Amino acid sequence: MIRKNLLLSAIVLSLLSVPAAAQVKERWFKGNTHTHTLNSDGDSTPDAAVTWYRERGYNFVFITDHEYITDVAPLNALFAQADQFLVISGQEVTDSYNGKPYHSNGLGITKAIMPAKLSGAVETLQKNIDEIVAAGGVAQINHPNFGWALTAEHLIKLRGYSLLEIHNGHFLVNNQGSIDSPSAESLWDAVLSSGKAVYAIADDDSHSFKRIGDPTASTPGHGWIYVRAKELTRNAILEGLRTGNFYASTGVELTDVELGPKQVSVSIRALTNSRYRTQFIGKNGKMLTETGANPAVYQITGNEGYVRARIVESNGKMAWTQAVFVPSR
């Protein structure tokens, strides 16, 4: 009996000696980083907006009203404990110069930042980004093609931002670009090709929760991210955004993403009647290869500059991994 008790004690001690963090596996948490309510130009209350996301399988949402910080404590008290749902504060800093809009999200900030109102696109956005970062937030540049405001040159010059919207669910932001203006995704490639580690965001820019199905309204449910984290907390989600530990989606779900020094691989949660192709993309947006395999794997050779994956579903849904930079060999 004594030996048995000693054995049990040894097992317990060995388990206790393992750090708690090591015992917790990372999970995927679905969320939206761009949401408006009646506190600025949305059509619904914060709790109605949060309810829409909570009831549709999301795990977190940022409230990002224009020049207003929504108090999220009552919302978390209402929703989080019972449903494992998290609401995080934020703001869309709404600036402009020479008639063009320059908008950025301060994710995680708790005090409103007023627009800089400076001369010049870069000067204006840089001041706002600096204030977001100084306030402890994660800086996200929004809809670069809205009003045809931002160019690759602007985005390359800017410093300190972590996130760039390459898919914004608003119906008037020109995600796909035009004959003489690159798509938002191509702008991201230009930034990556300059050597900047900036992470791709898909989100809603939701304003209208009362006109679901109206193509002329900025409704929810068009783009989101999956953050990989060990827990659903404010700090864990913000850290995932800062470090690029997430992927962006308009409907394709991944079960695993590996961005390693030797290979990039993605595993797709395939729908029965859908087909998928994974495109591996390198510096300057070059298509490296395309495959229908699942998992899709790309072996890094050393001259790609960076490698990222774009997954295209046969009905038009997509997902984007972040890029892994490849040192020249």
Image (cartoon, helix red, strand yellow):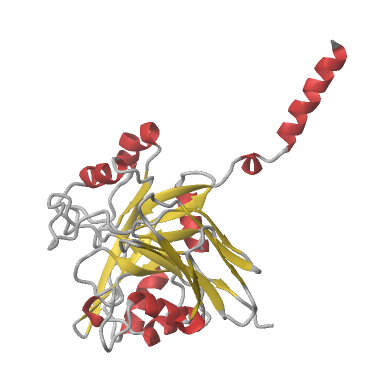
Where residue 326 sits: x, y (%)? 61, 76
Q: In this view, does 167 lie above or below 78?
A: below
| Count of residue discs | 0
* Residue situated furthest front in the rendering: 273
Residue occupying the point 57% across, 81% down: 305
Please identify the quadrant where the N terminus is shown.
Answer: top right
Task: Name the residue: 78% across, 22% down.
Answer: 9
In this view of the protein, which residue sits in the foreground, 93 or 301? 301
Horizontal and vertical percent position of residue 187: 38, 80
User: Can you name the residue that lies furthest to the bottom here?
Assistant: 180
Residue at 32 percent of width and 70 percent of height: 142
Q: Can residue 144 be seen in this view?
A: yes
Q: Name the quadrant containing residue 295.
A: bottom right
Can residue 111 be seen at all in this image of the molecule? no
Q: In which quarter of the image is the C terminus?
A: bottom right
Left or right: 286 as drawn, with respect to 204: right
Look at the picture and state if 196 lies above or below 134.
below
x and y, in percent, of residue 178 in the image: 25, 83
